[in-house]
């Protein structure tokens, strides 16, 4: 493909034949365009000469590198997104994109929407934390939102295989790094905003600003009006705004909510809709997640009663309030809750319907926001009857240091707790001490089947650990 079809460039480079596009110098081949991205760990400009040595035909950069074949642009993140879209002939233009952003709930909302749309006979692409999907085909993922090249490759494959809709989680990192730059979203959904990723964004204001970018790229914004940041998200938007709530005046409201351990029911109310909703997953968060999905589906033109029928038959999402079946008389829940708000939501949900104790097991990730650790310790002490503090993904940090940060939030609490650094041993201990009618919540890992340690990544599937533990009691 000629360079001029990928990006605006100087006259003498327009007819340069390009054989590929990448921002990873390790992937450069003869004839490639190499885009210099200044990332968190390294600056692509430092690898420009290496890329040329490997056969790159042109270097896209933000500063003059004194190279013959260079194109200087204002923002290489945006340039990479534009070039990636052009390389695949802008496949997103043929798809209806639905973007979901927020601290918690993104995965659940996208899965709900995928299954709702499929119930109407649509073939749907899904992009998110657990996996990417084209219909029933599963494609492994490493990032919540892929880089711009991989994202457009996915769009192209989804288009080719007959998808009309793509439901995708859109992370704050992706928005900040322009991975979804210049895409047009049919609907964008805001679930909530609570403390997370401050190791990257530094302040909540920066985190909010990153999230808000999605709503400047959509035709319709669907916003949780109960969230404290809802007004700031909506402020200054030119698109249509639809709000949902369980307590405020909004476009759509959930009334007469009935909470059960494994399900929720409510009446969906608006000026033009009155519909009974049931979802076979418990918790207040399920009310909010389903409201977001229903509002979006209604906006897309689907029928309320058929949406409700689809919701009532939904399969659960792996690692999201996932019940691990056992015959011991207690309940074991695996959940991805890894933020203060997420931990509060899952523990408070099961506290409301407990018959005996809520036992909370959790840790915090290493080389991530340290300020949330004592907050999560305090939340666990308030909403659980017994707490087991363990390791999550310590990465390069000392697990003991992470645990000590968590314990600051437990100091002085009357709630009993125990520290077991090894997560496998901690899970086995939780199962061993569980009594009839206890609810054991294993928080933090969710769908993950690995643990990231200082010396590498190991296999750790909590379902397997629980199964082994159950055999030992």
Image: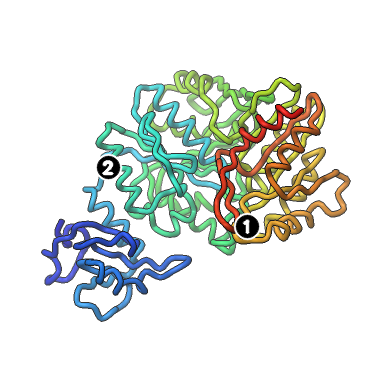
Left or right: where does residue 148 sit relative to residue 306?
A: left
Q: Nearer the viewer, mark 1 or mark 2?
A: 1
Cα–Cα span, label 1 and label 2: 36 Å
The image quadrant of residue 373 is bottom right
Q: Nearer the viewer, residue 403 or 38?
A: 403
- Residue hosting label 1: 366
Residue 240's tag is none
Question: The residue tagged with tag 2: helix, strand or loop?
Answer: helix
Name the spot of residue 359 as percent of width and height, x first. 77, 37
The crowding category of the residue bearing disc 1, from other C-alpha atoms within 10 Å (few below 14, some 14 to 19, many at least 20), is: many
Name the spot of residue 274 as percent of width and height, x first. 53, 21
The crowding category of the residue bearing disc 2, from other C-alpha atoms within 10 Å (few below 14, some 14 to 19, many at least 20), is: many
Residue at image coords 50%, 58%: 209
Q: Quadrant of the C terminus?
A: top right
**Whether residue 258 can be seen here:** no
Q: Nearer the viewer, residue 165 or 274?
A: 165
Q: How many marks?
A: 2
Residue at image coords 40%, 35%: 138
- Residue hosting label 2: 156
Q: Is residue 40 above or below residue 98?
A: below
């Amino acid at each position: 493909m000629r360079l001029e079809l990928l990006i605006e460039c100087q006259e003498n480079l327009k007819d340069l034949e390009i054989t590929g596009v990448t921002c990873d110098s390790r992937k450069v081949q003869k004839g490639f365009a190499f885009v210099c991205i200044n990332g968190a760990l390294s600056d692509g400009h430092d690898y420009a000469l290496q890329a040329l040595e490997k056969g790159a035909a042109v270097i896209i950069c933000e500063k003059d590198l004194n190279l013959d074949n260079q194109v200087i642009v204002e923002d290489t993140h945006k340039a990479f997104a534009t070039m990636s879209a052009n390389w695949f002939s802008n496949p997103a233009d043929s798809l209806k994109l639905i973007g979901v952003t927020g601290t918690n709930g993104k995965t659940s909302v996208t899965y709900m929407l995928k299954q709702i749309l499929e119930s109407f006979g649509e073939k749907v692409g899904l992009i998110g934390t657990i996996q990417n999907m084209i219909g029933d085909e599963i494609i492994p993922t490493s990032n919540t939102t892929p880089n711009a090249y991989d994202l457009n490759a996915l769009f192209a494959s989804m288009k080719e295989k007959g998808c009309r809709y793509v439901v995708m989680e859109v992370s704050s990192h992706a928005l900040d790094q322009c991975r979804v730059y210049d895409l047009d979203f049919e609907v964008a959904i805001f679930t909530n905003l609570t403390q997370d990723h401050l190791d990257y964004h530094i302040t909540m204001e920066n985190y909010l600003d990153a999230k808000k970018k999605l709503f400047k790229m959509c035709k319709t914004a669907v916003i949780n009006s109960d969230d404290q940041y809802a007004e700031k998200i909506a402020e200054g938007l030119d698109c249509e705004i639809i709000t949902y709530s369980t307590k405020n005046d909004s476009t759509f409201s959930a009334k007469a909510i009935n909470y059960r351990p494994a399900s929720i029911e409510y009446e969906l109310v608006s000026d033009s809709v009155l519909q009974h909703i049931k979802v076979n997953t418990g918790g207040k968060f399920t009310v909010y997640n389903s409201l977001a999905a229903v509002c979006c589906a209604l906006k897309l033109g689907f029928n309320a009663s058929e949406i409700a029928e689809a919701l009532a038959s939904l399969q659960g999402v792996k690692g999201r309030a996932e019940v691990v079946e056992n015959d011991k008389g207690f309940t074991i829940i695996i959940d991805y809750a890894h933020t203060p708000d997420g931990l509060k939501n899952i523990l408070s949900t099961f506290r409301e319907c407990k018959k005996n104790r809520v036992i909370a097991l959790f840790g915090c990730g290493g080389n991530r926001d340290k300020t949330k650790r004592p907050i999560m310790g305090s939340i666990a002490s308030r909403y659980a009857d017994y707490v087991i503090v363990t390791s999550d993904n310590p990465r390069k940090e000392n697990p003991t240091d992470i645990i000590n940060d968590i314990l600051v939030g437990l100091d002085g609490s009357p709630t009993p707790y125990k520290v077991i650094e090894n997560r496998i041993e901690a899970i086995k201990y939780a199962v061993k001490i569980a009594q009839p009618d206890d609810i054991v919540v294993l928080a933090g890992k969710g769908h993950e089947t690995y643990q990231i340690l200082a010396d590498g990544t190991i296999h750790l599937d909590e379902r397997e650990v629980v199964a082994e533990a159950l055999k030992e009691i």
